[in-house]
Amino acid sequence: MKKIIIEGRKKISGTIKISGAKNSIVALIPATVLTNGKCVIKNVPDITDVKTLLEIMKDLGSVITFENDTLTIDNKNLQNKLIDEKHASKLRASYYFMGSLIGKYHKVSIAYPGGCVIGSRPIDIHIDAFKKMGIDIIENGSIFDMSVDELNGIQIYLNFPSVGATINIMLASVLAKGTTVIENAAKEPEISNIASFLNSMGARVFGAGTSRIVIEGVESLGDGFVETIPDRIETGTYVIIGALLGNNLRVENVIPTHIEALLYKLKEAGVKYSLDGNSIVVSATENLKPINVKTSVYPGFPTDLGQPISTFLTQCNGECLFEETIYENRLRHVPHLNAMGANVKAFDNRAIITGKTPLHGRKVKATDLRAGASMLVAGLIADGVTEIQNIEHLLRGYERIVDKLSQVGVNIKLIDE
Ligand code: EPZ
């Protein structure tokens, strides 16, 4: 089991460079299945979710090199075979092999996806869309056997603007006959990143980033090239840390508009930051004002920053209201925060956070990826030493976290025991 040991309350300054977005790269890699051409993907984060997906790709016969954050992937000898539970259950994003393999081969056998225990994580919106495309789906235990003779474009309205379902429908549609229209599509920046990758291969995807995406099916695809966008959740996590401990902390390689909702909320709390090219410079602010945070779909406040911001709210002077609206079980970090001295009263997906409460270092657990981030922020501001166990969760979505924080003055180490 891996754990992180942090000595808290160190002022941090210097530069943290943001890596490529986890929630883009986990779709970009499966998307390469759609072409026989060669794909080059730049700014790839070296995180465990990438390692897991590359294992699946190599198992299918993909030829891959990964050097200096650049992936080259050659799938001309790919075999379409079962993606078993051992691999598929390691991450939610394994379901993108449904859209890409069915889009390319009209057939796929894959086990049910994994993912953080932040809710039931159904895939009914994906399945409903695939069925509307005429795909036969047979569930054999945890395996989905999917097949279709001819894949035709569809007009579909998503009951919820699901990120995963929007991307999966795009992947299944780019080689379909005719046109697919997705109404009420998700608008997260990662969707546009995937669309530009598909279009670089010769696909015809229009309107990504808006709630209406049109995909005109094409016969085949060629070589692909894309740069993974900066990870907006990693960016937000480090900006929050800078707002609590920074001394002109520079968070570099960011797209500020991707975290506009967070920046607005931090400004409302009295945080001073400045934009300098593709960097955000942020410093700790005394006397933080209480604010209310409610997560929602993009461009609203991102659910993935809900747990990290809840630690920030413990340092505001007064009562803050927090509400998570996307997942049904994303407050599992609250007992660990309270054990460190916070005053958080949680009711279902809402919490009343009363600050300012000094936090004290102790042994805590990361219950899921972003809960781990919340614990990390807490350990950095707590007095004394904090030990965060089950840190594997955190390493799924934050590249080189120990290096990046050590370089700006944090006393942090990773122990593998
Ligand atoms: C993506 O998950 C991200 N994961 C999540 O990040 C992120 O929180 C989420 O989008 C929202 O932004 C990846 O991209 C790998 P959804 P996804 O489909 O695609 C329900 C992180 O920490 N739903 O928009 O699963 C679902 O249960 C992770 O990096 C259905 O009910 O998100 C959830 O309540 C966590 N049926 C809500 O919609 C479905 O078929 C949002 O899901 C699909 C989703």
Image (cartoon, grey):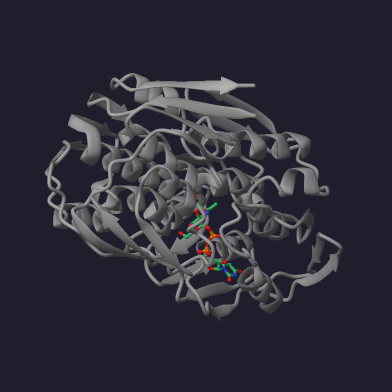
> Which residue is at 18% across, 53% downward?
317
Image quadrant in which the C terminus is located: top right
Residue 3 left/right relative to 376 = right
In the rendered view, tell whether residue 275 sits above or below residue 252.
below
Image quadrant in which the N terminus is located: top right
> Looking at the picture, how far across and down is residue 217, in whole percent?
58, 65
In the rendered view, tell whether residue 89 sits above or below residue 182.
above
In the rendered view, tell whether residue 326 sits above or below residue 388.
below
Asked if one can make out residue 80 in the rendered structure from this viewpoint, the answer is no
> Residue 302's image quarter?
bottom left
Asked if one can make out residue 311 in the rendered structure from this viewpoint, the answer is yes
In the rendered view, tell whether residue 41 sits above or below residue 288.
above
> Looking at the picture, how far across and down is residue 49, in whole percent?
59, 39
> Looking at the picture, how far across and down is residue 126, in whole percent?
63, 68
Residue 410 left/right relative to 223 = left
Which of the two residues, 340 or 270, is positioned nearer the viewer here?
340
